[in-house]
Image (cartoon, rainbow, N blue to C red):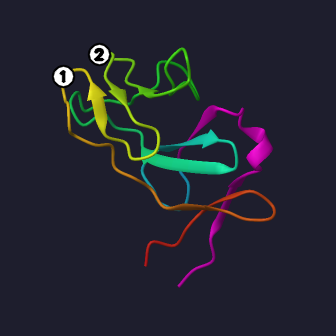
């Protein structure tokens, strides 16, 4: 078992907000969404289109910041479970990434 990998401080992400990560501990590109003290993380890959979700760095949320938005075709996903609720892939879900929140910030958790 390896130690969790520090990603960033919680306050470095807007509330609500998102932040993308690449080349972290061999993990494919992913992003974290913050809602208050909770964080949710998903692989940066649309299950319908097969492309990254963000249209510019760290931009993963809808305009009202209530859903995750695929910039390629407008699909909307729940923040808390990654399930598509609107668009061409209803019921499909984003692939979750395990993260934790600790005293210093957000960590990529050990998958083992």
Q: Is residue 85 left or right of residue 38?
A: left
Quadrant for residue 44, please give it: top left
Numbered range of the magenta stretch: 1-22
Q: Is residue 90 left or right of residue 58?
A: left
Density class for disc 1 (Cα within 10 Å; few <14, some 14-19, many ≥20) is some
Q: Label 2's element?
A: loop
Quadrant for residue 108, please give it: bottom right
Position of residue 32 measured from the top left corner of the image (x, y, whole percent)? 56, 44
Identify the residue at image location x=21%, y=40%.
92
Identify the residue at image location x=54%, y=20%.
56
Which of the two discs, 2 and 1, labels the residue nearer the N terminus?
2
Residue position marked by numbered label 2 in the rendering: 73
Position of residue 39 measured from the top left corner of the image (x, y, whole percent)? 59, 49
Density class for disc 2 (Cα within 10 Å; few <14, some 14-19, many ≥20) is few
Residue position marked by numbered label 1 in the rendering: 88
- Location of residue 40 with respect to 62 vertically, above or below: below
């Amino acid at each position: 078992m390896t130690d969790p990998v520090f990603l960033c401080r919680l306050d470095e992400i807007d509330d609500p907000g998102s932040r993308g990560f690449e080349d972290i501990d061999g993990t494919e590109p992913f992003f974290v969404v913050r809602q208050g003290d909770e964080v949710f993380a998903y692989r940066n890959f649309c299950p319908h289109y097969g492309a990254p979700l963000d249209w510019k760095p760290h931009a993963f949320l809808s305009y009202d910041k209530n859903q995750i938005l695929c910039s390629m075709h407008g699909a909307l996903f729940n923040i808390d479970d990654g399930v598509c609720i609107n668009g061409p892939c209803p019921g499909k879900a984003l692939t979750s990434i395990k993260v934790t929140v600790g005293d210093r910030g957000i960590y990529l958790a050990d998958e083992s």
